[in-house]
Image (cartoon, rainbow, N blue to C red):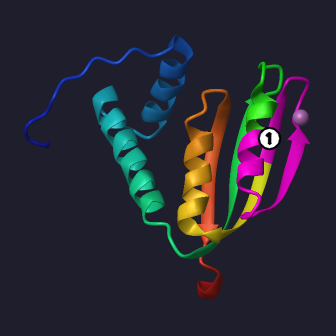
């Protein structure tokens, strides 16, 4: 048990909490607190990994969204046009009547790839925004 534990109150949508409880049960956590601590550690690890991305990279950003949201495709288009120097291609899949998935393929300076990712991830209308990169001369 870690020292100096702080207690926080978190409000969550009911369905999110249900899904989280199923996962922590499947993984054998002894409490929600333990599961939340582990999830936060994973979030911080991902952020730290991402913050270290620099130099020449090739990568993908995957995202999903409901295309009925007003203005969402304009925002997505605007951001992508701002980064045309590093965007090599993108693939759009109409997953069902409402939802779309897009994969953006990038090549260029890692810091700039991070910048476009940060622009996308903070947009509330976009879900599952994930970045993956490789160093071209290390494969
Ligand atoms: Ni679509």
For residue 5, what is the image quadrant? top left
Find residue 99 and report its image quarter: top right
User: Residue visible at 43% across and 66% down?
Assistant: 52
Considering the image in quadrants, where does the N terminus appear? top left
x and y percent of residue 2 in the render?
Answer: 13, 43
Q: Is residue 7 left or right of residue 21?
A: left
Residue 42, x across and y down, in percent: 40, 48
> Which residue position is annotated with label 1?
77
The reply to whether residue 31 is visible in this rendering is no
Is 31 drawn above or below residue 135 in the view shown?
above
Q: Position of residue 114 (x, y in %)?
A: 55, 57
Q: Is residue 104 magenta?
A: no
Q: Which residues are magenta?
A: 77-102
Q: Is residue 57 above or below residue 2?
A: below
**Residue sticking out furthest to the bottom:** 137
Tell me the crowding category of disc 1: few under 14, some 14 to 19, or many 20 or more residues within 10 angstroms, Cα based: few
Q: Is residue 44 above or below residue 34?
A: below
């Amino acid at each position: 048990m870690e020292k100096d534990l702080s207690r926080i109150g978190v409000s969550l949508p009911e369905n999110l909490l249900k899904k989280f409880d199923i996962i922590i049960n499947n993984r054998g956590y002894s409490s929600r607190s333990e599961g939340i601590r582990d999830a936060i550690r994973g979030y911080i690890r991902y952020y730290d990994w991402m913050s270290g991305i620099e130099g020449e990279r090739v990568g993908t950003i995957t995202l999903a969204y409901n295309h009925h949201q007003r203005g969402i495709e304009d925002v997505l288009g605007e951001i992508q046009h701002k980064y045309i120097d590093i965007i090599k291609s993108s693939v759009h899949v109409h997953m069902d009547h409402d939802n779309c998935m897009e994969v953006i393929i990038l090549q260029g300076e890692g810091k700039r790839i991070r910048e476009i990712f940060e622009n996308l991830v903070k947009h509330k209308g976009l879900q599952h925004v994930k970045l993956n990169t490789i160093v071209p001369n290390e494969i």
